[in-house]
Amino acid sequence: MSHFYTNKTVVITGAASGMGRSYAVLLAQRGARVLLTDIDEDELCVTAELVAKYNGTLPLTMVHDVSKISQWQALAKLCKNTYDGCDILINNAGIEGAAVPVWASDMKTIKRTMDVNFYGVVQGTKTFLPLLAASPASALINVSSIFGFIGTPNASDYCASKFAVRGYTEALMVELAQVHPHIQVHLVHPGGVATDIARSERTAKFKEKFLTTPSDEMVNYVLQEVAANNPRIVYGNHARKTYWSSKLLSLSALQKMIGKGMKKLAHPDDYAKDHKGFKL
Ligand SMILES: NC(=O)c1ccc[n+]([C@@H]2O[C@H](COP(=O)([O-])OP(=O)(O)OC[C@H]3O[C@@H](n4cnc5c(N)ncnc54)[C@H](O)[C@@H]3O)[C@@H](O)[C@H]2O)c1
């Protein structure tokens, strides 16, 4: 597996925290050249220093908002000018979304969730395809979620963004196989992974109960499956159970199962029958 990543140039978004940090460190250990990006400059520097422990030198970093096309273009230029290309792009950056039910959500937050989680992946994919096509052995890794298979309470915008990543990437897999089959395309569906993605007080209980798989364990699994060219990667707390339930159960049985699991985690105020979101 190590051989697959040796001397590869890998761009990782969302590298300042959680799984992005794990990708950076574990890929550096496997001999890859990593280019790290995030909006959080301070924590990005912390990741860069962790990587330097293995590489001896600080990796290239860039403060980069995945929702901004001009910043994607600047990143691709930096990668081309510095490393003469890119072999692997990991579209990892993501945010938790509104964390409220539909009637309590606002359009500004929903749009931000889509801009980061979905359009960030779209822009990254489109901007880097020429570089990946030029590499003799390349991979595109788009991060969805197990919430890319099921709709869960208080996560309608997040689920929509992760379903969208899945649909977009599955279509791309078929398209690229016709013209550039040497580009591996992967969809990652993490289950509950112990990171800081659930930042709001509303999701504290969810974080404690579900986000339990260590980030390095999750990313080690992803790297192993990418090296084995497995297109769909499902791993982490509740991931396989959720995946198979979404395939095998009727939608009404699935809804009952999800409702039962999520019942104690909801914010009572949001579920008031007279919530203002029901008023005209
Ligand atoms: N943790 C889980 O249980 C879980 C489960 C399923 C899917 N995921 C997905 O895995 C990916 C990584 O999440 P994580 O759990 O490591 O979360 P995390 O919050 O620890 O890390 C996400 C990183 O993305 C960065 N980021 C946020 N908005 C950005 C933007 N606009 N541009 C660039 N960077 C931005 C953050 O600053 C942060 O460093 C996300 O796409 C997330 O949706 C996570």
Image (cartoon, rainbow, N blue to C red):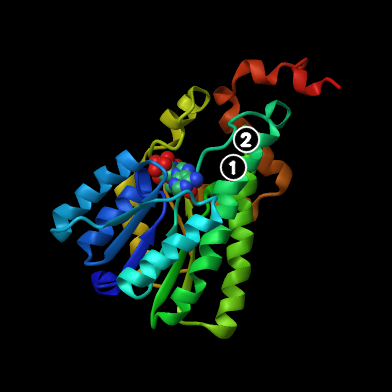
Q: Is residue 16 above or below residue 11?
A: above
Give the position of the N terminus as an image quadrant: bottom left
Residue 133 at what x, y percent from top left? 47, 79
Cα distance between the residues tagged 1 and 2: 6 Å
Image mark for residue 109: 2
**Amino acid type shown at disc 1:** Thr
For label 1, the SS is helix
Q: Quadrant of residue 81?
A: bottom left
Q: Secondary structure at mark 2?
A: helix
Give the residue pinned by disc 1.
Answer: 113
Give residue 154's quadrant in the image.
top right
Identify the image quadrant of residue 275. Answer: top right
Residue placed at 38% from the left, 71% from the top? 80
Q: Give the x, y percent position of residue 85.
A: 37, 74
Image vertical order of residue 258 relative to residue 165, above or below: above
Mark 2 surroundings: few (<14), some (14-19) or many (≥20) residues within 10 A: some
